Every structure is written in C-alpha cells, then in structure tokens.
Image (tube, coloured by chain):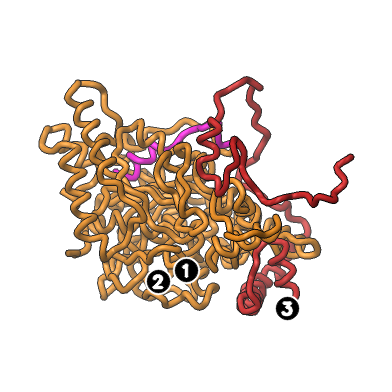
Amino acid sequence: MDIDNVRKVAKLARLDLSEADLATMTTQLSAILSYVDQLKELDTDNVEPMAHPLPLKNVFRPDELRPSLPVDEALKNAPARSGDFFAVPAILDAGDDLSH
Amino acid sequence: MIERTAAELIALQAKGEATAEAITDAFLASIKARDGEVKAYQFVDEALAREQAKAVDAKRKSGAKLGALAGVPIAIKDVLCTKGLPTTCSSKMLQNFIPPYDAHVIENLKAADAVLIGKTNMDEFAMGSSTENSAYKTTRNPWDLERIPGGSSGGSAAAVAACEAACSLGTDTGGSIRQPASLCGIVGIKPTYGRVSRYGLIAFASSLDQVGPFTHDVTDNALLMEVISGHDPRDSTSVDEPVPAYTKTLNTPVKGLTIGVAREYFGEGLDPEVEASVKQALKEYEKLGATIKEVSLPHSKYAVAVYYIVATAEASSNLARYDGMHYGHRAKGKHDLIATYSKSRAEGFGKEVQRRIMLGTYALSSGYKDAYYLKALKVRRLIKNDFDKAFESCDVVMGPTAPTPAFKLGEKTADPLSMYLSDIYTISCNLAGIAGISIPCGFSKTGLPIGLQIQAPPFAEEKMLQVARMYEAATDWHTKRPKLG
C-alpha cells in the first residue's frame, strides 16, 4: 500500500487528512495489512462466507401510523437550522440542469 | 456500603437498613473522593441520581411493587443513548449530542427502578483495548493507577472495580467487556449475539456488537442479564427467545460438566502468571467434579486478522453517518458539501477511528473487496465451525481472557497491532456470535487481577452463569477490592 492508495481511500472515506497523516497512515495500514495477509495461507474455495452470526430474515411490521420524533426534537442536535429544516451547504450549483 | 454488591444493596433496602437515597449518596461521595484519580466517568448528574433514588424510596413507602434493581446505582458506557443526557461516545464528533430517546437497555433499567448515576469514559466509538483512545481523558486501573483499565469499556469496568458504582453496562465488539473485566478483577459478560437489543447502542460493528453488564460477582451479573435481555422489535437482529430466570438456577452446580480447553489458548504470548492462575482454576473445577477435555480451535490464530477486516468494514459503513449535517460536529467556515464532510470528519474523529475507517474503506473498495472482506468472511465461518465442533464434546470452553495483566499507560499506543493482539482470546467469540464471560481467578505477584474466560454455545447463558458461579462459590477472588483514597 503506497501513499497514493491511501490518498484515494481517504477521499472515498471523506477524511481530509494532512500529508503527514497520510504518511503515518501508509506505514500503519501497511503493517496491519501484512498481518492480515496470513489469511491467504488458508484454502477457502469451498467455504460459504459468514456475514452474520444469525440466520437473518427480513422483519416486517404493519404499515401503520405511529408517533414520530417531533420536528423540534429532531432538529435539536442539528449543527445548523433554518426554520423547520436542517441547514446544509449548497448541494447543486446554480448552473445544474434540474429538468430531469 | 460502596463495596457491597447490587444483590446486597437490594437486601439492605428490603430490610429497611438503608434507603436508596443513602446508597446513592454513598456512591456519589465515592465518585467525589476517587474519580479525580480513576477518571472512570465522562459525566455524572448528582441531582438526577438523587431524584431517581428518592423516587424509589417513595415508591417503596407507597407499597407499590419495586423493580428488580430498585435503588441500585449503575453506571452506563457513554455509547448507549440516554434521553436528555449527553452521549459522546468519548468522541469530539458527538461532544454536544443529546439523544432524544433512550436505548432499549436504558428503558429496561429505568423500568427496573435502577439509579442511573452517570456515563462512563471509553475508547472513542468503542475502538480500542485500553480506553486511551478517548478524546477526553484516560481512565486508570483502580488496582494500579499507572496502568490501563482495559477497553473499550474501561470506564465502566473501573467504576465498578473502584466502587464508584455498584454495577455498570458496557459493550463488547471484540472483547470490550471481558478484557477490561479481567484487567479490573470483576465479572463481565458478552451475551450471545441477539440476546440483548442494540436499539440505542451507537453502532461500531453491527454483526459483532452486544451490550452486557459489569458486576462484582456472578449473582449480580445474572440479575442484570435478566433485566436487559429479551426481544425488542426495534432491533431486527434481536432474537425472540425466552429469557431464563438466571438468578433462580445460578446456584445449581452443573452435573457431569465437561470443560473444553483449547491448546491454542496456551501458546506464545501468554504471560506465565496468567497461565498459572488459569490452570489453577481448571484444577479447582476438577475438584468440583468437572472433566477437563482438550479441544482444538485451529483457526483461532486468524481471529484478530479476520476481526480487523470485518469490524473495520462494518465501522466504515456505520460511521459514514457522521457527516456534520443532521447532528455531530460540523467544520466551521464556508466550504462546499464534500469539503464540509471531509473536514468535519477529519476534525471530529480521533486517530484510531480514522485508521479503522480507512482500513474498512480499503477492505471494501473496488479491486480489494474479494481479497480482504470476502476472504475474512470465509475464515469467520471456519472460526464458527471450530466452536460448533468443540461444543459437540464439551459444555463450555475455558481459557485466559487476556494474554497479560493490565499493561502500563502509553505502553502500546504507538503500535496499533500490538494493542489489537491484547484481544486475541476474546475476538473469536464475537465473530462466532456465541456467549462469553470473564470472572476473576487470581492476581499477579504485583497485585494485578487475572481473569478466566468461559465461552458457551449460543443462548447457553444460563449454564454459563451456573458454571461461573460454581468456581466463584469455591473461591474468594470476587470479594477483593482495591485500596483507594
């Protein structure tokens, strides 16, 4: 794993890391990954992957109206609020085509 | 008073020898006297604790039926949502977060008339084995203040060991209850996956996380397990299995008990004093009539490697929600959307959390997913198969909880991998989804606690607690308390 890999992963993970952080991360992640590489010595061709300890199935509930969190409660922890809404940075540029 | 167990405090109140208010006052005084050094708590609300205690006393006076934990002061790991009270996960990201609802386990504790005394310090987002990854403070081991209490539930373990709470709740994703219980000389259980609802538990790795109690002894643990276990439709992985009356069967020794001992748990890296204490505990069980049988868990040496792919992959997904939009830290200044995300996350998360998000993101990224994530899931199956096979010939599997007693503050912070290896004996239990408990089984020559780990098949908590109680009834490690100011 080199620093360019790490830079790309940081972008995917939405972490604005400094060059120094990226360098440290490269060393540390490389060490952890080489430890993880011991898994390669196992033949797992015919092994079913196990994502979860339980045999999970979808859980349904009736589609009925239930009380939900009041607006003020929901907005209480918001970093920024505008009326009854979360205030966030602009998502679309003024020039974006909104026709579809 | 503060050295009593929850069951003893309940009995004192029933006999009219103490009020809930007096008990709560004693623990608040203990926090005042000791927590400056131990640093177990993130947050204590004295007035609220007293108010709850007074309500319990009033309820008793009125003749109404009291809950199973009436007037017992309990500390809560700061990863569990408490309505109207700060819940920081020991992270800057959630510095100002006040949950609008209670976690399922908190609702159950309130219904049982427990007194919630405060929130405890932890490794940020439950990622760590020493509680040194907290963004706020470093909790000390009550048996030696220069050493770590274990982690990630280090604050909850230290609070009970230091008698700053009668009992507490923690969470265990790879050993975060059992390892600190072992290092602090108390009892800690990781229930079977699905036994306790995760509703209101701030997620780290959803296929591994479970909530469980820390207590001075096995009886108290059984008592708390009765209160927090059970089905909850708000957690789709909560299992609808009846909750046995653990406290009722606790003192019935298991007849014809067969204990599996895995040779893999006694290899390189195991401290000789830990090994000696655990082997002595096995001899004690033989004296009690148990049969020791060697079993093999051949894939256990891969558990740490599997864990650091599976847990980080799940964490990278779970922690994607912290984007500075709806709650949590948002970076100051005017930035576009992506920069706001990236700066908020870089500022809000500490180094270990960032490292794990990076590792998990990499393991799930295009081109690497099969080599890392899928491979880890396959080896996870092999680890589970090992346990299934072992439990065909034994009731429980025993061994050390942690390879060494508590290490020194700062000893492993520079080397993440050596820190990860302190969970080598506890991690496979979470990967397999089975139950595990750590109970005190001795002390090192320098006076540091040592823990015995007992692992049991899924939903065999009842038997596991009986087995743990057999040893406890024959020994007195659980009655020891550290000397503090």
State the CA–CA distance, disc 1 to disc 3. 28 Å
In terms of sequence position, does the residue under pointer 2 or pointer 1 come before the other? 2
State the CA–CA distance, disc 2 to disc 1. 8 Å
* Helix, strand or loop at mark 3: loop
Image position of B143 (left or right of B135): left
* Helix, strand or loop at mark 2: loop
Image position of B114 (left or right of B333): left
Seen at 20% across and 42% down, the residue is: B8
**Is residue B245 shown above or below B307?**
above
Residue A42 is labelled as none
Task: Report crowding for label 2: few under 14, some 14 to 19, many 20 or more residues within 10 A (C-alpha).
Answer: many
Of B318 and B268, nearer the camera is B318
Image position of B398 (left or right of B65): right
B14 falls in the magenta region: no
| Residue A42 pos. (x, y %) | 70, 67
Give the amino acid type for the residue marked by disc 2 in the picture.
Thr
Mark 2 belongs to chain: B
Q: Where, quadrant-wise, is the C terminus of chain A in this rendering? A: top right
Q: Which tint is chain B?
A: orange
Residues behind callouts 2 and 1 on a single chain: yes
**Is residue B176 shown above or below B47?**
below
Give the amino acid type for the residue marked by disc 1 in the picture.
Ser
Q: Is residue B122 visible?
A: yes
| Residue A29 pos. (x, y %) | 64, 73
Identify the residue under disc 3.
A2
Q: Which tint is chain A?
A: red
Identify the residue under disc 1.
B422
Residue B404 is labelled as 2
Q: Residues in magenta?
A: B219-236
Do the residues under discs 2 and 1 have CB atoms within 8 angstroms? yes
